[in-house]
């Protein structure tokens, strides 16, 4: 992928003078190569977007650049000199600061205390609070904040806290600023305010790394972009050389150059309406959407990581309940304010992160399978051991769960078998509606095929499913309809001949008027 044009660009940028550079950096965890000979260069006075899906290697690269991890191969340079970063604190001495999505400050202390934490001005050996507040006020005005520096940080909005965190990082470092998902929890006006701060820092010559999943923000703010996939460098390009479609293709690793539906699912006449979500949304999570779901159909959900796919699923299942809109079940309006409500209405949910949110690792395979049904029945109708064994055996066989014993801890099973256990758990509740979030991610080929067959069988048996997947070819193959998410908004609903990879990629990449953000970022 590093063609002659790419090499010439890298050579020209290096001659200009990188503020920070990683050359051929690698990182290995056990047998997994998280980074494989990655190059990354950061110029003074630029905003450089770092993009990639889950497992691409973004977090690993950032931790190496900030000294949290040490590389297993390769070299780091700051202002052309080789450095060995052993900790984030040492990285600060080289001018490298980081601000994360979750502000890592002290909300119960004052704004000024957070700005000067660890390097407070002193007088006669004591903290000089008057001077600290005075200097904090001057510093805050530089960032467009007219707030009382003695006020508690936690009393201010997330956007203000982000700007305070940036001000502190720049003050401590001053050469390189790494922003990891800084806009994820902000509304539109707050994003605009943050962009103005970033633009000002860029004009001052700061080198800025911008990690985000919002493509519109990338094109509004960034000068260059580096794309990682599966630990490898895909490309580094100036944004002016790329279209949104180019960028999505590179991130997904698909050369989508064909048209015509490849779906194995013939277009069907709508069956009985099961669920109808109308104006369903949650502030700072998913913009209101409307979606009708019929029995016997699979609604595929496509979109890049961070597009709102998982947030929509969690909202449908009541984990993060909607704060506007309505949902009807078989024509009757219902309330889904919690997962307990959802289970009571016949919903099931297999989460994206099976280890953190799915399996109960220390419990047995049997206990993991029966726990959702037991919760639905209530503890006054407890399943006895024989009933649990029969139920677990029935669904274990149906899902081809390969375990030495149903009483062994589920954490000892392979990833594919753990995924089958979670799916068996919900099938045991006889759900009318099942949500699957990345059901085939990170599992072997055999388990992958078994889960896809199960999705097709459940659809044919009349169940309604919503299936989220990053694999475009896969979601095309089994979906009756596909909805596309972008920037936490449902931007397209595809059916018939539009169910094909080219249309999906175009829908993900298309620049919508509702998500446009303007920013003055020119130097």
Image (cartoon, rainbow, N blue to C red):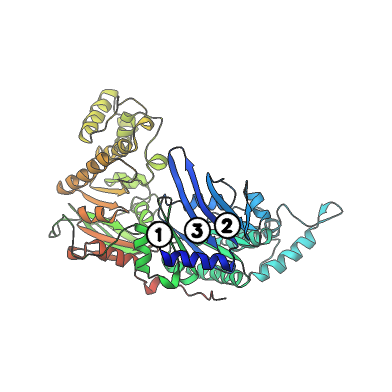
* Image quarter hosting the N terminus: bottom left
Marker count (numbered): 3
* The disc label shown at residue 323, or none: 1
Report the mark closest to the observer, 1 or 2. Answer: 2
* The disc label shown at residue 99, or none: 2
Rendering coords of residue 517 (x, y %): 46, 72
Q: Quadrant of residue 46?
A: bottom right
* The disc label shown at residue 193, or none: none
Report the mark closest to the observer, 1 or 3. Answer: 3
Distance CA(mark 3)–CA(mark 2): 9 Å
Rendering coords of residue 259 (x, y %): 21, 66
Q: Nearer the viewer, residue 294 or 393?
A: 393
Rendering coords of residue 188 (x, y %): 47, 69
| Residue at x 79%, y 62% (from the top left corner) | 131
* The disc label shown at residue 181, or none: 3
Question: For mark 3, does the 10 Å Cα neighbourhood hold few (<14), some (14 to 19), or many (20 or more) residues?
Answer: some
User: Which secondary structure lies at badge 3?
Assistant: loop
Q: Nearer the viewer, residue 392 or 478?
A: 478
Toward the right, the furthest residue is: 124
Mark found first going from the N terminus, 1 or 3: 3
Q: Are marks 3 and 2 in contact (CB under 8 Å)?
A: no
| Residue at x 13%, y 57% (from the top left corner) | 266
Q: Looking at the image, is 212 positioned above or below residue 89? A: below
User: Which secondary structure lies at badge 2?
Assistant: strand
* Image quarter hosting the C terminus: bottom right
Q: Nearer the viewer, residue 253 or 465?
A: 253
Mark found first going from the N terminus, 1 or 2: 2
Q: Are marks 1 and 2 in contact (CB under 8 Å)?
A: no
| Residue at x 55%, y 60% (from the top left corner) | 158
């Amino acid at each position: 992928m590093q063609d002659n044009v790419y090499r010439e660009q890298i050579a020209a940028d290096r001659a200009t003078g990188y503020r920070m550079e990683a050359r051929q950096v690698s990182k290995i965890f056990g047998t997994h190569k998280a980074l494989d000979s990655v190059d990354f260069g950061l110029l003074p006075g630029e905003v450089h977007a770092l993009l990639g899906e889950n497992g691409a290697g973004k977090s690993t690269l950032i931790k190496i650049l900030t000294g949290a991890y040490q590389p297993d191969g390769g070299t780091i340079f700051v202002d052309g000199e080789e450095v060995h970063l052993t900790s984030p604190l040492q990285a600060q001495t080289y001018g490298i600061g980081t601000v994360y999505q979750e502000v890592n400050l002290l909300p119960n202390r004052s704004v000024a205390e957070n700005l000067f934490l660890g390097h407070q001005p002193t007088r006669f050996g004591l903290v000089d609070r008057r001077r600290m507040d005075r200097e904090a006020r001057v510093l805050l005005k530089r960032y467009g904040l007219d707030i009382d520096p003695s006020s508690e940080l936690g009393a201010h909005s997330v956007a203000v806290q982000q700007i305070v965190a940036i001000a502190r990082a720049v003050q401590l470092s001053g050469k390189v600023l790494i922003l990891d998902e800084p806009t994820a929890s902000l509304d539109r006006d707050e994003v605009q305010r943050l962009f103005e701060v970033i633009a000002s820092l860029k004009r001052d010559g700061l080198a800025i790394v911008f990690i985000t999943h919002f493509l519109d923000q990338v094109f509004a703010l960034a000068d260059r972009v580096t794309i990682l996939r599966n630990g490898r460098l895909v490309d580094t390009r100036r944004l002016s050389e790329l279209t949104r479609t180019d960028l999505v293709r590179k991130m997904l690793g698909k050369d989508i150059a064909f048209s015509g539906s490849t779906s194995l699912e013939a277009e069907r006449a709508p069956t009985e309406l099961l669920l109808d979500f109308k104006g369903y949304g949650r502030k700072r999570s998913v913009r209101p959407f409307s979606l009708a779901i019929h029995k016997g159909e699979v609604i595929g959900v496509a979109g890049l990581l961070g597009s709102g796919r998982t947030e929509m699923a969690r909202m449908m299942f009541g984990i993060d309940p909607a704060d506007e809109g309505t949902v009807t079940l078989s024509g009757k309006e219902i309330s889904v304010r919690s997962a307990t409500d959802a289970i009571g209405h016949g919903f099931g949910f297999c989460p994206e992160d099976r280890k953190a949110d799915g399996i109960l690792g220390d419990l047995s395979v049997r206990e993991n399978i029966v726990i959702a049904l037991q919760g639905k029945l209530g503890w006054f109708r407890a399943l006895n051991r024989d009933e649990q064994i029969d139920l677990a055996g029935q669904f274990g066989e149906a899902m081809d769960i390969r375990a030495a014993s149903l009483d062994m801890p589920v954490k000892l099973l392979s990833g594919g078998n753990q995924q089958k256990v979670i799916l068996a758990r919900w099938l045991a509740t006889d759900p009318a509606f099942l949500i699957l979030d990345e059901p085939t991610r990170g599992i072997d080929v055999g388990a992958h095929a078994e889960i896809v067959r199960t999705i097709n069988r459940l659809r044919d048996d009349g169940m309604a499913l919503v299936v989220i997947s990053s694999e475009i070819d896969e979601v095309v193959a089994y979906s009756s309809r596909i909805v596309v998410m972008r920037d936490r908004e449902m931007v397209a609903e595809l059916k018939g001949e539009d169910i094909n990879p080219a249309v999906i990629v175009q829908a993900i990449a298309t620049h919508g008027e509702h998500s446009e953000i303007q920013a003055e970022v020119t130097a």
